[in-house]
């Protein structure tokens, strides 16, 4: 990774480029322009052999002009003066030939983020390829050392990147921030006399010193892979289900899609008539916190320059907002919610129970630790996915299970949430503990 001074120099060049574009277009046309540069290193080790080492230094310039209610968008990696002028001319030409859309245009000026916030996202670390290789190798070796039943590796990865974000438009906003992200990952294969199984573990953080130790990542991957040995099929039934913290974010990601502006405007969601109605148990709350220091989803403006704010998504079980950009908001007569480009940090409320207490509360059922396939229909809410997990009896994990499918409807699944434990998974924009659902259909033998 480049030094802090080099990254700051790159940032200044990008800011100057954006300012130059805004000056060129001043009083000619409405425009918004963003620049993004990512600088990083990635190392992949497998069976102690280096499979690849990748360096990247990618830049992208995105320009959108609005000619009354027509829109023209152009992207390029050419940051030269001629390249910028050509981009601007091309965007204007495209807008002249584009269909008119009354809802197109820049965000309302009062919604723009005109004041920056320090979210403590940028923590560059000067380390060599040798250090990255060493971290990946240590992770894999820890997994092999843990148990002789670990017989192979699908790879051990180390990734680091620094990203510069710049945004400006003709309404007077010019904002910027820098961020770093580090991750380490290991996936291994276990084997006994009857079968082979795989599993993985990883760590991700804004600061390299906050990553889990390589030995811990390797050991956890090995433990999880070994726990899958001896998996069995089970009969078809209806039973309680726990989504472990590793997959709970996926469970709530369907809510993100169901209340996104695109789906609301197209009326292609089963929640179209549920704003301000109860869709979860009364005790459950979801809040979006975009300004968490060092948060993986933190940002103080969205991809349109709209200021992000803390807001209720679900309050006392009721759906309180859609997730809207400016275009979608205008179509339904509302204002942007600052969610252009996706969500920020979602924090899901939980009960004051541990994961072990959650197992006891379930007593008997399936603990889901991996989801397979994409069988979720946001229009109807129908849910059907293959899973890997464990059979639980008398509140204790009995044995792993495989070749089963769980199915239901998201509306019923959300209402049937009994409890969420306090083992919060923080490696995702959606932070949630393990989720106990009272009943789902299990398809097995």
Image: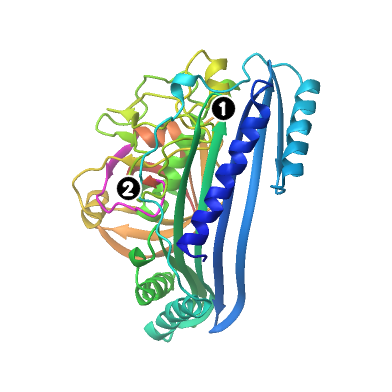
Q: Give the magenta-colored segment's residue range.
A: 416-429
What colouring style does the render use?
Answer: rainbow
* Label 1 or label 2, whichever comes before in sequence order: 1
Please give the name of the residue rendered at 46% of the width and 73% of the height, measured from the top-left corner: 127
Q: Residues within 10 Å of mark 2 (few under 14, many from 20)?
A: some
Residue beneath label 1, please? 263
Viewer-side residue, 85 vs 275: 85
Q: In the current view of this chain or complex, which residue is farthest to the left?
A: 352
User: Is the residue under label 2 in contact with that under label 1 (CB below 8 Å)?
Assistant: no
Q: Is residue 422 magenta?
A: yes
- x and y percent of residue 228 in the render? 43, 69
Q: Is residue 381 above or below residue 407?
A: above
Res 6 seen here: yes
Viewer-side residue, 235 vs 114: 114
Q: Is residue 402 above or below residue 156?
A: above
Res 162 seen here: no
In this image, 431 relative to 179: left or right? left
Q: Residues within 10 Å of mark 1 (few under 14, many from 20)?
A: many
| Secondary structure mostly seen in the magenta stretch | loop
Viewer-side residue, 425 vs 222: 425
- x and y percent of residue 191 in the render? 49, 80
Q: Is residue 226 above or below residue 147?
A: above
Q: Residue 427 sits in which quadrant?
A: bottom left
Residue beneath label 2, please? 293
- x and y percent of residue 351 in the render? 22, 43
Q: Is residue 196 above or below residue 90?
A: below
Please give the name of the residue rendered at 34% of the width and 43% of the height, measured from the top-left corner: 437
Q: Nearer the viewer, mark 1 or mark 2?
A: 2
- x and y percent of residue 438 in the render? 32, 41
Q: Residue 211 sits in which quadrant?
A: bottom left
Q: Is residue 233 magenta?
A: no
**Distance from Cα at disc 1 to Cα at disc 2:** 31 Å
């Amino acid at each position: 990774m480049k030094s802090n001074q080099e990254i700051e120099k790159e940032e200044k060049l990008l800011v100057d480029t954006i300012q130059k574009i805004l000056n060129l277009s001043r009083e000619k046309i409405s425009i918004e322009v963003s620049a993004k540069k990512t600088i990083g290193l990635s190392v992949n080790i497998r069976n102690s052999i280096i499979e690849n080492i990748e360096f990247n230094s990618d830049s992208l310039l995105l320009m959108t002009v609005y000619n009354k209610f027509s829109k023209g968008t152009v992207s390029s990696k050419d940051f030269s003066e001629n390249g910028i002028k050509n981009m601007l001319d091309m965007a204007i030409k495209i807008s002249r030939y584009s269909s008119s859309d009354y809802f197109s245009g820049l965000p309302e000026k009062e919604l723009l983020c005109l004041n920056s916030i320090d979210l403590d996202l940028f923590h560059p670390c000067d380390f060599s390829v040798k250090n990255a290789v060493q971290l990946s190798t240590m992770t894999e070796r820890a997994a092999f050392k843990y148990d002789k039943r670990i017989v192979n590796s699908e790879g051990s990865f180390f990734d680091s990147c620094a990203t510069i974000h710049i945004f400006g438009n003709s309404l007077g906003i010019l904002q910027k921030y820098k961020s770093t992200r580090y991750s380490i990952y290991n996936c291994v294969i276990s084997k006994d006399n009857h079968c082979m199984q795989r599993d993985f573990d990883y760590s991700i953080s804004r600061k390299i010193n906050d990553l889990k130790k390589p030995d811990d990542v390797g050991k956890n991957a090995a433990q999880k892979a070994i726990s899958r040995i001896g998996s069995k099929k089970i009969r078809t039934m209806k039973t309680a289900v726990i989504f472990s913290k590793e997959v709970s974010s996926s469970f709530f990601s369907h809510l993100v899609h169901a209340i996104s502006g695109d789906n609301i405007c197209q009326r292609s969601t089963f929640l179209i008539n549920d704003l301000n109605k109860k869709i979860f148990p009364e005790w459950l709350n979801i809040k979006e916190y975009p300004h968490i220091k060092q948060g993986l989803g933190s940002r103080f403006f969205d991809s349109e320059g709209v200021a992000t704010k803390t807001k209720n998504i679900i309050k006392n079980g009721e759906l309180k907002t859609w997730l809207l950009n400016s275009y979608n908001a205008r179509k339904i007569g509302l204002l942007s919610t600052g969610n252009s480009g996706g969500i920020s940090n979602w924090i899901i409320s939980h009960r004051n129970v541990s994961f072990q207490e959650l197992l006891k509360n379930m007593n008997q059922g399936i603990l889901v630790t991996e989801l397979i396939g994409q069988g979720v229909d946001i229009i109807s809410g129908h849910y059907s996915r293959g899973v890997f997990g464990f059979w639980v009896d008398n509140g204790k994990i009995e044995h792993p299970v495989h070749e089963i499918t769980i199915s239901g409807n998201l509306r019923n699944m959300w209402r049937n949430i009994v409890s969420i434990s306090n083992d919060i998974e923080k490696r995702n924009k959606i932070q949630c503990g393990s989720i106990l659902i009272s009943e789902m259909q299990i398809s097995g033998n």
